[in-house]
Amino acid sequence: MAVEVQPVLDAARLRADFPIFEQTFHGKPLAYLNSAATSQKPRQVLEAMTEFYETSYSNVHRGVYTLGERATAGLEGAREKVRAFVNAPTEREIIFVRNATEGLNLVAYAYGLARLKPGDVVLATQLEHHSNFVPWQYVAGRTGATFRIIPIDDNGDLRLEAVADAENVKVVAANIVSNSLGTIGDTRRLADWAHERGAILTCDAAQAAPHVRLDVQALGADFVAVSGHKMLGPSGIGFLWGRTEILLEMEPFLLGGHMIRNVGDERTTWGELPAKFEAGTSPVAEAVGLGAAIDYLEAVGLEAVEAHEHRLAAYALDLLAEIPGITLYGPPPERRAGIVMFNVEGVHPHDMAQILDLDGIAIRAGHHCCQPLMRKLGVPATNRASFYLYTIEDEIDRLAAGIRRAQELMS
Amino acid sequence: MADPGFDDLYREVILDHYKNPHNYGLLEPSDAHAEGQNPLCGDEVSVSIRFAEDGETIEEIGFEGRGCAISQAATSMLTDLVKGKRAAEVASLPKEEILDEVGIPLTPVRMKCAILGLGVVKVALNRAKGTPLPEEWQGLEIE
């Protein structure tokens, strides 16, 4: 008989891999509760990058010399790790970009701008980060297509019935995990919904990839964009996954070196995948760092990370709910990643974040690049505490105590 | 410098202005009006201004806003500061004057909160009197 083992990780032990926690802020140990904005980096990632720079760095793809081959192996080895990480059928579908935003812009420009026309409809959710909202709003405006919002309910679930009347839907833009409410979306269902209408589904997975297992073949989406920096990797690298058949038909995005097959005086032809979408010198050491981050995540296990975050979200929601005057937003803990968004009566989020900082606690205050959501909630700003594999309950206890202190001070 | 504590960051005078803002509420009718947001956090300030008979001196000013203690208190202080001053004088008012009034150490992010109101007042004056805009408001689409 198979035994169901609940995956467990030891956050206090993992924490020792992250040098950032070795210092104090305002005399207090760092409580880093802003991993949804960006994650901290384990020593293993930093060392992999340093070692690569010290022993293997060169430009890639064109060096005939041994060092050039070594650098190319570093980049392409990282691409294979990414492919396996998201279960893509081939590494030709893995395009390195600067971050998820660039990946989503690539889709909006190279797919949307070239294909959309008046009468077409683009749908983006009310829960989108600006990165998967603004490019489509803009490209719809440029092409004369209609841009519409898929409204959400209080849990962050999509109210698809509200856009059921939309005809000629060509693009649906949605996140897989929300960076604000933390809602884990039903991407498979949305992909089927989009495909039934002949539309593509382009997904912002910046908040999903670090926290839940992604399988692009099972998801059914057509594009999936990820930022490396939110998943223990360095800044300056991310990736876009897309289906071969769509990528082959698309126009290029950035033009220049490496993305060509032949440059004639009159006309240029494009290179093969993924080079067609990777103009210019690649972020090679960053790719190596991203590969090391994937190794780290796989060693811990994404299932263990997700379970850890559900536990922390439940712990935080219980603890914070006891605070008078607090409003908690979003779905129940089992349906959300490690993100808790809240407001506290009488204390503006900026003031909250400033006062918490005095206790060494880092949270995000503001609109979280989600102004459409803020309008739905009817608030200009909120507080957001977000967790990762290195987050411990003590940090959440300190958050709760800090919120109470802020209430007293501002009253 | 030692780490600032709460009392250094939120001086009594700031909390007073935040809780009981001066010149709160927009003027109807008014001679100049503008609203502006801090794009980093979405905080909002609206101001309206009425000039004296000379058409230059700010006789009345009112504001409304949603935001943190720093942005709202600084705007409240600003309304006291500019009343009785000429439009051209306020348009060239350096941000240091309002930062001195606020009188607390501000990080670059919070500094934007503190000068939001001043920027919006200068936009209103620009519209009504053609006075210069501050650098950070030039070339923007403003409601």
Image (cartoon, grey):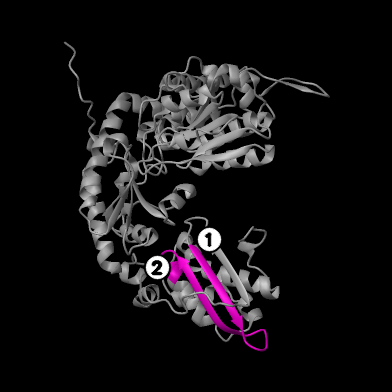
- Tell me the mark number nearer the camera, choosing from 2 and 1: 1
Q: Are marks 2 and 1 on the same chain?
A: yes
Q: Position of residue B106 (x, y in %)?
A: 44, 66
Q: Residue at x 56, y 74 (%)?
A: B48
Q: Label 1: state its secondary structure.
A: strand
Mark drawn on residue A8: none
Q: Amino acid at mark 1?
A: Gln
Chain identifier of the residue bearing label 2 in the image: B
A30 or A193, which is in the foreground? A193
Extreme top residue here? A1
**In the rendered image, which residue does mark 2 sit on?**
B69
Residue segment shown in magenta: B44-72
Question: Around disc 2, counting alpha carbons within 10 Å, would you say few (fewer than 14), some (14 to 19), or many (20 or more)?
Answer: many
Disc 2 marks a residue whose amino acid type is Ala
> Which quarter of the image is occupied by the N terminus of chain A?
top left
Q: Quadrant of residue A92?
A: top right
Which mark is first along the chain, 1 or 2?
A: 1
Q: Position of residue A334 (x, y in %)?
A: 27, 34
**Quadrant in which residue A127 is drawn:** top left
Who is closer to the viewer here, B143 or A53?
Answer: B143
Reading the image, the residue beneath label 1 is: B37
Q: Residue furthest bottom?
A: B53
Q: Position of residue A152 (x, y in %)?
A: 42, 41
Q: Residue at x 59, y 16 (%)?
A: A245
Is there a contact, CB below 8 Å, between mark 2 and mark 1?
no
- The quadrant of the picture occupied by the C terminus of chain A is bottom left
